[in-house]
Amino acid sequence: MKLKMIAVIIVSLTILSCNTNSINVKNTYLDTTGRTDLLAGGIQMIPIHTDKGDFNVWTKRVGNNPKIKVLLLHGGPGATHEYFECFDSFFPQEGFEYYYYDQLGSAYSDNPKDTSLWNIDRFVEEVETVRKALKMDASNFILLGHSWGGILATEYALKYQNNLKGLVISNMVPSIPEYNKYANEVLGPKLPKDILAKIKSFEAKGEYTNPTYLKLIEENYYPEHILRMPPAKWPDPVKRAFAKLNFPIYLQMQGPSEFGIVGNASLTNWDRKKDLQKIKVPTLSIGAEFDTMDPKAMEELSKLVQHGQYLYCPKGAHMAMYDDQQTYFTGLIKFIKGLDTK
């Protein structure tokens, strides 16, 4: 009888300890003691030194948690932090400290016109500079990259993974040639034949900015594979991010087509599948059934890294944080919390 009572007491104390830890995190979540960004509400402009001059990039902190600091890398290239604003509905209640960040050339950051700045290696060094400025390290630094941000996160991990606690690659595959093949051989043929024929005719003539072409893409491709809602009903953060897209950067790196990366775009031949085995930091790959990216390729990514997990969003597309939101955030939060048990 006494043994049973002791066991009950031990279990109760364990539960109480866990609850107390959770309460303590939430009690200190809004603590800004010693913060230098207090005056600006968490915003910090970080100097970036390049061979082409010095610039500033914009970051904004939400919350306080010494053990969990998530840096969000937006897509594009050339989009903005704004479409991540849905994270406000989920991360604060978990006590996660997280950072919005506009990469150089995007939204609130400086926008130099020198096209030589738009390359992967320089962006990787930019992320490293941001990490140092925000005082993140392997004890707390979680890097989450979505779409192009997933490419950037992959490249960062291959060079600086010793600085990471965890890595999240959201809605991005490790091979652009495979992405192109999927877009043209799988997704394209799913469109009505007459619609696909019209789209291809415009692309054959290089008329990527033709209003009719853009309307065809917006009405037929976007609601199926980008965000599964009518574009007119897309959430405000997504609309703002798309409206502010820095098209010259996007054109140089991604290219003009919505069916893969084509032409002289600098990312056309990017492929890191063979190098993923070098990534030893815990990694979560997030894929979605209706994504522009092959969900099976994103699952494969999780198996090619040393310690990978896969989160599948059955209702989601490329912006699964919106169109399969509960699945996305339930899995993401579980992964982040699990990093403290490793």
Image (spheres, helix red, strand yellow):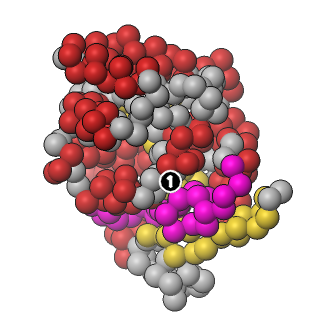
For this rendering, which residue is in front, 51 or 129?
A: 51
Residue under the image location 21 percent in, 46 percent down: 231
For this rendering, which residue is in front, 270 or 215?
A: 215
Q: Is residue 117 shown above or below 171? A: below
The x, y position of residue 209, in whole percent, is 40, 40
Q: Is residue 272 shown above or below 99? A: above
Image position of 161 (left or right of 187): right
Residue under the image location 43 percent in, 69 percent down: 62
For this rendering, which residue is in front, 318 or 324?
A: 318
Q: Secondary structure at mark 1?
A: loop
Q: Which residues are magenta?
A: 88-115
Pointer 1: what residue?
Answer: 246
Residue under the image location 61 percent in, 59 percent down: 104
Quarter where residue 15 is shown:
bottom left
The x, y position of residue 291, in whole percent, is 33, 29
Neighbour tally class for label 1: few under 14, some 14-19, many 20 plus, Cα within 10 Å: some
The x, y position of residue 309, in whole percent, is 45, 29
Image position of 318 (left or right of 342): left
- Magenta span contains residue 234: no
Q: For the residue marked with disc 1, what is the amino acid?
A: Asn
Quarter where residue 139 is shown:
bottom right
Residue at the far right: name it. Answer: 51
The x, y position of residue 129, in whole percent, is 71, 60
Residue at the far bottom: name it. Answer: 39
Count of marks overlaid on the render = 1
- Magenta span contains residue 98: yes
